[in-house]
Amino acid sequence: MQHLQTDNYNVFAEICKPVLLKYIDHSKLNDTEKKYLQMFSTWNLRNDINEKGATVFKVWWDSVEVATYADEYAKATVKLPWPDESTLIDKLISDSSNYKFIDNINTPNKKETITDVVTLAFKNAAKTLQDLEQKNKLEWVKFKDTRVQHLLQIPALSNLHLPIGGGVHIINATSENHGPSWRMVVHLTNKIEAYGVYPGGQSGNPGSKYYNNFIDYWAAGKYYSIIFVNKHDVRKDERMKWHTVFVNG
């Protein structure tokens, strides 16, 4: 269960990958673009911290959405939400070239196909990817750049640049600044066995060593054993550091 909660396998990418590779026009790619396509083609579909293919997919898919919807929605007089990602990939899987959003309304003399959209989106994405690579931010951990912020958004009191994978469409749904924080696994046997962790610490005092001492464990996907004892065993349990006893005055 611990491994499940920190699983970085990207199910959405598993669906999208063969479709994107099907419609990309290799003949229109330069050497730099082919390099990024190779990163995506050989990607293992896991958003682990060192994966560059995960970044290529994220940037490419975002670009596909822009190439599909931006021209139509730019004409809207009010801000409207774009269709769900599942709607778009469903249309691409079914080869729906007649999907009204595929054609770019700004090119009246041409009717775009899925291949046109996917290829243009990749070429646009490659420009972003090249910029990321120059800044040494192509690895997923650097691109996503997860942080746990202080409630007042004060960087000095926050934990930045955490080495953790995951993301949208993944069981480990950790994004840049949101995601599953508290993790807990409980085995309800007669003697309860439980493990848990959260990205923080047991003290709200930034000067305390307990302010953020759980952060590294949480980012690494590790867990602490949680102590469950009944009132009869609490005094003799060796894991108890001290006891507080209240008596009548």
Image: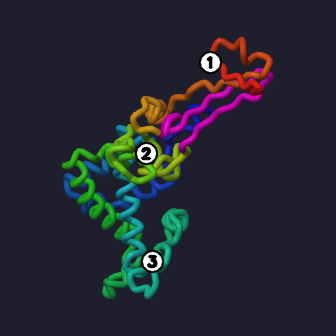
Q: CA distance from mark 3 to mark 1?
A: 66 Å
- Label 2: how many Cα within 10 Å (few below 14, some 14–19, many 20+): many
Residue 219 placement (x, y as % from top left): 45, 36
Give the residue type that dot 3 points to. Answer: Phe
Query: Contact, CB < 8 Å: mark 3 with mark 2?
Result: no
Residue 149 placement (x, y as % from top left): 42, 48
Q: Where is the N terminus found, in terms of image quarters? A: top right
Q: What residue is pinned by disc 2?
A: 148
Q: What residue is pinned by disc 3?
A: 101
Q: Number of marks in the image? A: 3
Q: Nearer the viewer, residue 63 or 172?
A: 172
The magenta span reads 181-204
Element at label 1: loop
Q: Report the residue at 42% width, 80% height from top.
A: 73
Quarter of the view holding residue 87: bottom right
Residue 228 placement (x, y as % from top left): 71, 25
| Residue 147 appears in the rendering | yes
Give the residue type that dot 2 points to. Answer: Val
Q: What residue is pinned by disc 1?
A: 242
